[in-house]
Image (cartoon, rainbow, N blue to C red):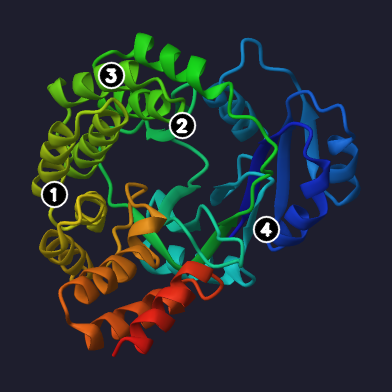
């Protein structure tokens, strides 16, 4: 079985050796450099990568990805798309081969650790589907691009069990190009829920609350907006916009709607619990944080956030139990919160306080 890695890059020499070490299990590595000025192409080539240089003007990620895919030899059995700031756990090649032999699917997803805490702990984790057969796929959307199957028949997505890819980004790298590209995507496909959701989220990240609210409401109203997890996320973002503009009661309604839209996801419960903690509504905090913790299976899509799977729901439960006079339980949940984030001084102090008050 021939497995090739392909990527796009620009000014990422600092990651070249680490990335090539990780990708060395492939039969070949193919990279499209889109205008580096720091010697990235030479650094990659010296490690055995096949590198082509071409600027993409005007810039869009899907075009660059498709050009990089064109570099991959036609005899590839599987193509693996990664970025230079991503690293596989060792042994990924053998595990991917095993999955492909057992499932024989056109496309596979693997575990993707998108973020890490300062102590290296895993943050946001979801399953990413950037492993695919050489033919029949094209990249689509100017940003937050996805692979689209060009065949007539639908297929089952395979799962590369045991394959984990870690994202270690450059914190200095700007995401300034995202907003104009997301606006472009929404203009190109105004009826696409994905484009509206991502654009509304980006406006929220930028602190443009009014535009975020307008776009997120548009997302929810689109006829094709039927994915409950994505809809619930838009509702949570709308709640955040309401909070930022002083509309707390309206924010609570959106949090409630998010919980109802996707009751199997932790995020809505945790944000609702946090809201109640600001109101010192401790029974409400307890109900929502305990409901979150009752969900033990993390969703595999990108619609999950690290706060829901870290210390926060445990911490909120501990606070609620203490305020409600159940100090033994406050100690238990406070200890679990600290296990999730052992270097957090506030959590350390809280647990010591609970234990001193028993």
Q: Which mark is residue 215?
A: 3
Residue identifier under label 4: 26
Image depth: mark 2 or mark 4 in front = 2
The local secondary structure at tag 1 comes to: helix
Distance from disc 2 to disc 4, alpha carbons, whole Å, reads 25 Å
Residue identifier under label 1: 259
Q: Residue at x 26, y 40 (%)?
A: 233
Going from N to C along the chain, the mark reached first, 1 or 4, is 4
Going from N to C along the chain, the mark reached first, 2 or 1, is 2
The local secondary structure at tag 3 comes to: helix
Residue 45 spot, x, y in % from top left: 87, 43
Going from N to C along the chain, the mark reached first, 3 or 1, is 3
Left or right of residue 232: residue 101? right
The local secondary structure at tag 2 comes to: loop
Residue identifier under label 2: 144
Quarter placement of the N terminus: bottom right
Distance from disc 3 to disc 1, alpha carbons, whole Å, reads 20 Å
> How many residues crowd mark 3 within 10 Å: few (<14), some (14–19), many (20+)?
many
Of the pair 32 and 35, the residue shown nearer to us: 35
Distance from disc 2 to disc 3, alpha carbons, whole Å, reads 17 Å
Residue 188 spot, x, y in % from top left: 37, 10
Left or right of residue 304: residue 29? right
In the rendered image, the vertical position of residue 151 relative to residue 319, given as above or below: above
């Amino acid at each position: 079985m021939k497995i090739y890695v392909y990527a796009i890059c620009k000014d990422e020499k600092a990651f070249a050796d680490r990335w090539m070490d990780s990708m060395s299990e492939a039969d070949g590595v193919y990279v499209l450099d889109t205008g580096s000025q720091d010697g990235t192409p030479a650094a990659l080539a010296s490690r055995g990568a096949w590198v082509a240089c071409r600027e993409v003007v005007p810039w869009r990620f899907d075009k660059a990805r498709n050009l990089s895919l064109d570099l991959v030899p036609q005899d590839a059995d599987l193509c693996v798309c990664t970025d230079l700031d991503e690293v596989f756990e060792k042994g990924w090649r053998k595990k991917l081969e095993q999955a492909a032999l057992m499932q024989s699917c056109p496309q596979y997803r693997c575990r993707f650790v998108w973020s890490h805490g300062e102590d290296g702990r895993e943050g946001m984790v979801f399953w990413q589907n950037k492993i695919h057969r050489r033919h029949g796929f094209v990249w689509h959307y100017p940003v937050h691009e996805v692979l689209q199957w060009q065949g007539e028949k639908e297929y089952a997505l395979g799962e590369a069990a045991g394959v984990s890819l870690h994202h270690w980004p450059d914190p200095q790298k700007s995401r300034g190009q995202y907003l104009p590209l997301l606006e472009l995507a929404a203009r190109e496909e105004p009826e696409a829920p994905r484009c509206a959701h991502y654009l509304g989220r980006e406006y929220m990240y930028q602190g443009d609350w009014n535009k975020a609210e307008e776009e997120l409401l548009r997302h929810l109203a689109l006829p094709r907006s039927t994915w409950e997890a994505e809809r619930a996320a838009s509702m949570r973002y709308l709640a955040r916009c309401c909070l930022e503009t002083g509309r707390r009661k309206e924010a609570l309604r959106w949090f409630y709607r998010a919980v109802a839209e996707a009751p199997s996801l932790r995020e809505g419960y945790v944000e609702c619990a946090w809201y109640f903690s600001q109101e010192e509504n401790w029974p409400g905090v307890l109900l929502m944080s305990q409901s979150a913790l009752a969900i033990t299976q993390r969703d595999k899509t990108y619609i999950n956030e690290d706060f829901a799977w870290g210390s926060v729901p445990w911490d909120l439960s501990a606070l609620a139990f203490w305020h409600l006079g159940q100090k033994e339980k406050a100690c238990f949940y406070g200890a679990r919160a600290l296990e999730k984030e052992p270097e957090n001084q506030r959590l350390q102090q809280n647990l010591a306080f609970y234990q001193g008050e028993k």
